[in-house]
Amino acid sequence: MKIKPGFMLREIDDTSVVVAVGEASEHFNGLITLNTTGSFLWKKLQQGATEQELVQALCGAFEVDPDTARADTAEFVAAARKAGFLDE
Amino acid sequence: MSNHTVEEVLRRDGRYIATPVGVSMWPMLRSRTDTVLLVPADAAALRRGDVILYRRPTGKMVLHRIRGRDAQGFVLCGDNQGAAEHGVQAEWIIGVMKGFFRKEKYIPVTARGYRAYMRLVLWTHPLRAPFLRLRDHFRRRKGASA
């Protein structure tokens, strides 16, 4: 699972947003704001992490129990999939 | 994740990042490649050289540079355009550019290199404008005959 080419994470101070460039911007002209966890997961997805790896990374980086991490990850991945950000 | 309009995000977060489309701000901004950081604009505080995002009454959003002001309102022009747009009203203005990403590098409008570029664009525009207008004229004719 990986973020499709053309979707970029831009970070300014404490804000992370996803913007589309190149061909991707022809079909997507919105703006997606990510919180800290979302930004973290996005970067992992850019490297091509599996959902299980995302859960593990989340547990390692944040003080969160595995069940919450699993639920948060599933929610994030579902939203990213629905928005068309994922290459699977 | 949340999805909102430019105005909503600027009101809520005080900033907006967008990917401009078109060549009017070339070479600073490359179409669908570079991204700009916008913040809410105070029309009274805007100055010559500022790059603003505004919405024409037709609904079209435009990102151009302020060349000045006259009795009709702001005078705007893209860096790569010959003809200026007059009569841009303060209430059309959505935001002002605070910086831009050229690929991965963020360049604030306070950067020395950017300030030098901005001055160069403003100072040389009267010299470049006739050639740019001529080029735009032939492009339009070519487009009309295509």
Image: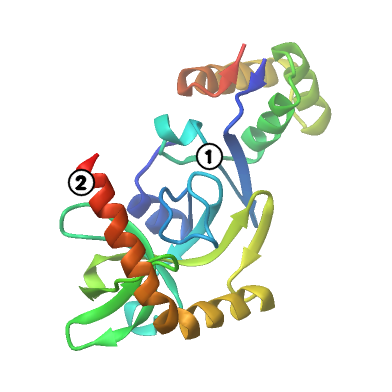
Q: In this view, does B4 lie above or below B137?
A: above
Q: Of the residues shown, which amino acid type is indicated by label 1? A: Val
Q: Of the residues shown, which amino acid type is indicated by label 2? A: Ala
> Mark 1 Cα within 10 Å, few/some/many (few <14, many 20+)?
many
**In this rendering, position of residue A85 left or right of residue B21:** right
Q: Nearer the viewer, residue A11 or B144?
A: B144
Q: How many labels does the image show?
A: 2
Q: Which of A34 and B125 is in front in this view?
A: B125
* Residue A4 position in % (x across, y down): 60, 24
Judging from the image, mark 2 belongs to the subunit labelled B
**In this rendering, position of residue B35 left or right of residue B21:** right
Question: Which quarter of the rendering shows the C terminus of chain B?
Answer: top left
- In this view of the protein, can residue B48 be seen by the observer? no
Q: In this view, does B109 lie above or below B8?
A: below
Residue at which label 2 appears: B144
Residue at which label 1 appears: A21
Mark 2–mark 1 CB contact (< 8 Å): no
From the image, state whether disc 2 or disc 1 is nearer to you: 2
User: In the image, what residue occupies the spot 66% across and 34% down?
Assistant: A37
* Residue A55 position in % (x across, y down): 74, 18
Judging from the image, mark 1 belongs to the subunit labelled A
